[in-house]
Image: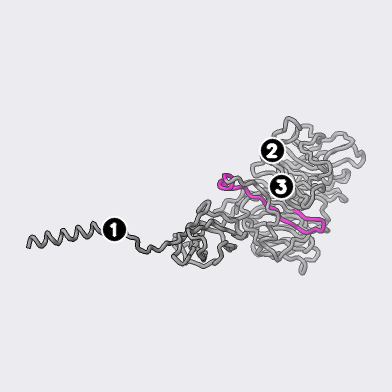
């Protein structure tokens, strides 16, 4: 018995060794292996734009036919706050994926590549971000008063590392809302999570999501208030019940902030006088996300040159509407700084060389409380009725335009004479058409119209709002973006606050 066991074991060892050493050539079927390569497993896409993506796909047998299948998972928030992956959804059978995702968020893309020998899978994480989350917003119009919205967002860290350069997207409104045209736009204001754009030509106020630029409501004045030709939107933040719209020929209409329904609360000022100039000052901290109680206050000033009258209302209430006449003066312009000191610049009717600067304090009681005057003689001044004017709270100064120049004025001085030397000068044939400051007040955004450019003639120049260039002795130019808009109407930094 023992001999049999040893014999069987010996035979097994010999057979096993023979199999290992068997170098005979039997038929072996080659397999075409598929490989999928991509620069990154993460894809970033701006909402509203089509994703066009083509990875590198190779196989060891180049002539073998390949088929493709793109699909994706989304993520859904549960009732208790968790995140779960939803079902797999088919996208395309093309090698190059082309698809516009309809919602913001995170997705998992799956690419399946198949030949007759089998399949290979590649997974990507896709982030669909708000294309217009924050950045520089420019409203402009061409010679036919056709409007345009241009927008430039800051680059992400990945984009900077990849060597991408900042650039304006010049069709931000029409690409998201192809069925709508901005006819003769005159003003744009961000209120809470939305942007409102006034169209004088169509007598409309457009309301769009400030992050995606999706248009979702319109206030039409043509039927009930045909006299309203919107040229100015008066507002502050999302705590408001109503905002106010200034009409070109005089008068104000009120629009409910929640319903977008226009109403008429009567005359803010007797006879609905035409307003030749509007100046707006918003003070206070933005409304916190967790409350509806606002610390912001709004001060709206208006000038009627024919009547030599300053009109004013506080915090959007007609109840606080006030007016003040200056029969002996030709009004020029008005401004208010962070300390609530308002400043009216005018010229004496009896002596055109006499410049009158009236300073006071704005409140719910009026625009120039406890006013005092400063006068001086000048043949010419750099501030005109056409000048755009704004205060810079960070550097406690006032900036205003005159043609292709921008001036800085310290209106709080004991002798507040208007400056003669500009702090910004653009090209001789150019015109500064609008300007604004960054949120911290340290950068200055200047909208410039340059008729010498081919194609789009609108530009944005970015300056340091305080530091001077030692060569030009004017504000230091940080960046210049040319040919990014039509004639600029409004430029501002659009934040992502709601």
Residue 78: percent from left, percent from top = 45, 63
Q: Is residue 207 above or below residue 327?
A: below
What range is drawn magenta here? Answer: 140-161
Q: Quadrant of the N terminus?
A: bottom left
First of labels 2, 3 by sequence position: 3
Q: Nearer the viewer, residue 269 or 400?
A: 400
- Contact (Cβ within 8 Å) of mark 3 with mark 1: no
Q: Is residue 4 left or right of residue 94?
A: left
Task: Name, please, the residue furthest toward the right.
Answer: 350
Of badges 2 and 3, nearer the viewer stands 2
Q: Nearer the viewer, residue 467 or 8?
A: 8
Residue 281, numbered label? 3
Marks 2 and 1, how far apart in space? 81 Å
Within 10 Å of disc 2 (Cα), the crowding (few <14, some 14-19, many 20+) is: some
Q: Is residue 118 above or below residue 39?
A: below
- In this picture the colour scheme is one colour
Residue 22, numbered label? 1
Residue 404: percent from left, percent from top = 81, 42
Question: Which image quadrant for residue 12?
Answer: bottom left
Q: Secondary structure at mark 1?
A: loop
**Residue appearing at x 32%, y 60% in the figure:** 24
Question: Which image quadrant for residue 331?
Answer: top right
**Residue appearing at x 64%, y 62% in the figure:** 258
- Contact (Cβ within 8 Å) of mark 2 with mark 3: no
Marks 3 and 1, how far apart in space? 92 Å
Residue 390 covered by magenta stretch: no
Residue 151: percent from left, percent from top = 68, 52
Q: Quadrant of the C terminus?
A: bottom right
Q: Secondary structure at mark 3?
A: strand
Q: Is residue 388 left or right of residue 349?
A: left
């Amino acid at each position: 018995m023992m001999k049999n066991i040893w014999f069987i074991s010996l035979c097994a060892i010999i057979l096993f060794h023979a199999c290992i050493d068997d170098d005979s050539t039997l038929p072996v079927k080659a397999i075409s292996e598929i490989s999928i390569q991509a620069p990154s497993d993460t894809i970033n896409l701006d909402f509203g734009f089509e994703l066009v993506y083509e990875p590198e796909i190779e196989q060891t047998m180049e002539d073998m036919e390949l088929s493709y299948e793109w699909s994706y998972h989304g993520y859904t928030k549960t009732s208790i706050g968790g995140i779960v992956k939803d079902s797999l959804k088919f996208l395309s059978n093309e090698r190059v994926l082309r698809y516009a995702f309809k919602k913001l968020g995170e997705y998992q893309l799956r690419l399946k590549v198949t030949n007759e020998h089998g399949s290979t899978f590649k997974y990507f994480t896709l982030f669909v971000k708000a294309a217009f989350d924050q950045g520089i917003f420019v409203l402009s119009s061409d010679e036919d008063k056709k409007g345009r919205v241009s927008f430039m967002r800051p680059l992400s860290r990945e984009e900077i590392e990849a060597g991408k350069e900042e650039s304006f997207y010049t069709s931000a409104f029409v690409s998201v809302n192809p069925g709508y045209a901005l006819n003769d736009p005159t003003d744009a204001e961000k209120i809470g999570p939305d942007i409102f754009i006034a169209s004088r030509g169509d007598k409309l106020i457009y309301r769009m999501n400030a992050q995606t630029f999706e248009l979702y409501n319109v206030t039409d004045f043509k039927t009930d208030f045909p006299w309203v030709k919107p040229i100015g939107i008066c507002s502050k933040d999302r705590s408001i019940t109503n905002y106010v719209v200034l009409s070109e020929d005089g008068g104000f209409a009120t629009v409910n902030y929640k319903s977008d329904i226009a109403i008429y609360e009567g005359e803010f000022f007797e006879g609905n006088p035409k307003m030749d100039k509007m100046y707006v000052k918003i003070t206070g901290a933005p409304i916190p996300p967790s409350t509806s109680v606002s610390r912001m206050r709004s001060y709206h000033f208006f000038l009627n040159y024919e009547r030599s009258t300053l009109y004013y209302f506080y915090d959007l209430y007609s109840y606080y509407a006030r007016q003040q006449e200056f029969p002996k003066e030709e009004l020029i312009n008005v401004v208010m700084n962070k300390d609530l000191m308002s400043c009216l610049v005018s010229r004496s009717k009896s002596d055109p060389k006499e410049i009158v600067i009236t300073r006071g304090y704005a409140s719910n009681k009026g625009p120039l409380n406890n006013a005092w005057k400063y006068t001086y003689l000048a043949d010419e001044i750099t501030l005109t009725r056409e000048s755009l004017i704004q205060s810079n709270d960070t550097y406690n100064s006032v900036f205003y335009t005159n043609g292709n120049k921008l001036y800085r004025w310290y209106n709080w001085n004991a002798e507040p004479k208007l400056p003669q030397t500009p702090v910004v000068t653009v090209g001789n044939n150019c015109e500064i058409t609008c300007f604004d400051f960054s949120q911290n007040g340290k950068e200055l955004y200047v909208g410039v119209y340059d008729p010498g450019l081919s194609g789009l003639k609108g530009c944005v120049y970015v300056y340091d709002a305080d530091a001077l260039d030692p060569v030009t002795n004017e504000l230091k130019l940080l960046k210049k973006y040319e040919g990014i808009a039509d004639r600029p109407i409004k430029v501002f930094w659009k934040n992502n606050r709601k």
